[in-house]
Image (spheres, rainbow, N blue to C red):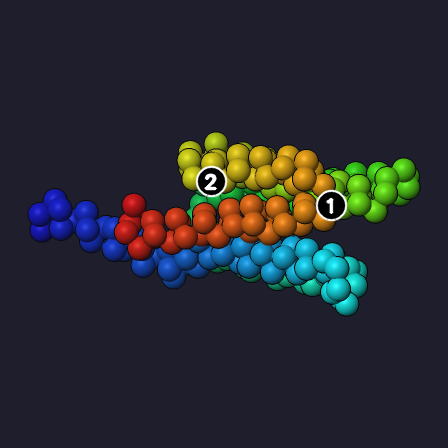
Amino acid sequence: MSAEESLNLIAQQNRRTRRELGGGPARMLAAWALAWIIGWGFTYVTTLPGVGVPGWVAGGIVVPLLFLGAMAYSTFTSIRSGRGIRGPSRTVGAMYGYGWALSSIGLMVVDIRITQFQALSSDQVSLLWSGTWLLLTGVMYLAGGMVWQDKLMYGLGAWMIVSAALSVLVGYPANFLVLTVCGGGGFLLGAIVYFVREKTGR
C-alpha cells in the first residue's frame, strides 16, 4: 500500500472505532442541544402573554427531565467510549467528569442558599440560576479545550461564557431565549462540526 492508501485506511478505522464506541462528542452535544432548545424554548413560550401553561411545568418538569436524559446519555456514552483505554488518558477523562459533578453540586448549593435569603425577586432568581449554570458550562468547556488541545471545545466554552453574560444583561424572560438560541444553538453547531470531522476523518 502507498502512504496515501495507508493514511486513508487509518482514517477509516478511526471513524469506525468512534462510531462503535458511541460516536465521539457529536452525539453528546446533539443530546444537550436538544435538551436546551426544547427545554428553554418551552420555558420561554410559557412566559408569553396568552399562554395557559404555567411556568412550573417547564422549570419543574420539562427541563429537569430533558437534562436528566442528556446527562444519562452523556454518562453512558463516556463510559462506553472509555472501554479499553488505560493510562493518563483515562485518568484525565475521569478527573474531568468528576470535575463536572463536583462543580455542579457546589453551584447548586450556592444558588439554593442565595435563593433562600428571599432577597431576590422571582425574575432575579431566574437570572441567577440561568446565568450561573451557563457560566459554569462555559468554564468547563474552556478547561476541556485546554486539556485536550481542542480549539472547537475551547471556542464553545468562550461562546457559552459570553452567552451567560448576555442572558443576565437582557433580563427576564428574554434570558430563556438566550439560553435557547445561544446555548442550545452553540451545542448544535458544535455537534454539526464534530459530526463533519468524524465523517471526513479530520
Residue at 68 percent across and 47 percent down: it is 174
In the rendered view, tell whether residue 23 sits above or below residue 168.
below
Q: Nearer the viewer, residue 10 or 197?
A: 197
The image shows residue 53 at horizontal and vertical percentages of: 76, 66
Label 1 environment density (alpha carbons within 10 Å; few <14, some 14–19, many ≥20):
some
* Mark 1 or mark 2, whichever is nearer to me: 1
The amino acid type found where label 2 is placed reads Met
Residue 86 position by quadrant: top left
The image shows residue 119 at horizontal and vertical percentages of: 90, 37
What separation in Å lies between label 1 and label 2 (alpha carbons)? 28 Å
Q: How many marks on residues? A: 2
| Rendered image: mark on residue 3 | none
Q: Nearer the viewer, residue 75 or 188?
A: 188
Per the image, label 2 sits on a secondary structure element best described as helix
Residue at the extreme top = 146
The numbered mark, 1 or 2, whose residue comes first in the sequence reads 2
With 153 as the anchor, is 173 left or right in this view?
Answer: right
With 141 as the anchor, is 99 left or right in this view?
Answer: right
Residue at 50 percent across and 40 percent down: it is 156
Q: Nearer the viewer, residue 201 or 126?
A: 126
Residue topped by disc 1:
172
Residue at 39 percent across and 49 percent down: it is 194
Residue at the extreme left = 2
The image shows residue 167 at horizontal and vertical percentages of: 66, 41
Disc 1 + disc 2, Cβ < 8 Å? no
The image shows residue 160 at horizontal and vertical percentages of: 57, 39
Residue at 67 percent across and 45 percent down: it is 175
Residue topped by disc 2:
153
Per the image, label 1 sits on a secondary structure element best described as loop
The amino acid type found where label 1 is placed reads Tyr
Can residue 68 be seen in this snapshot? no
Can residue 185 be seen in this snapshot? yes
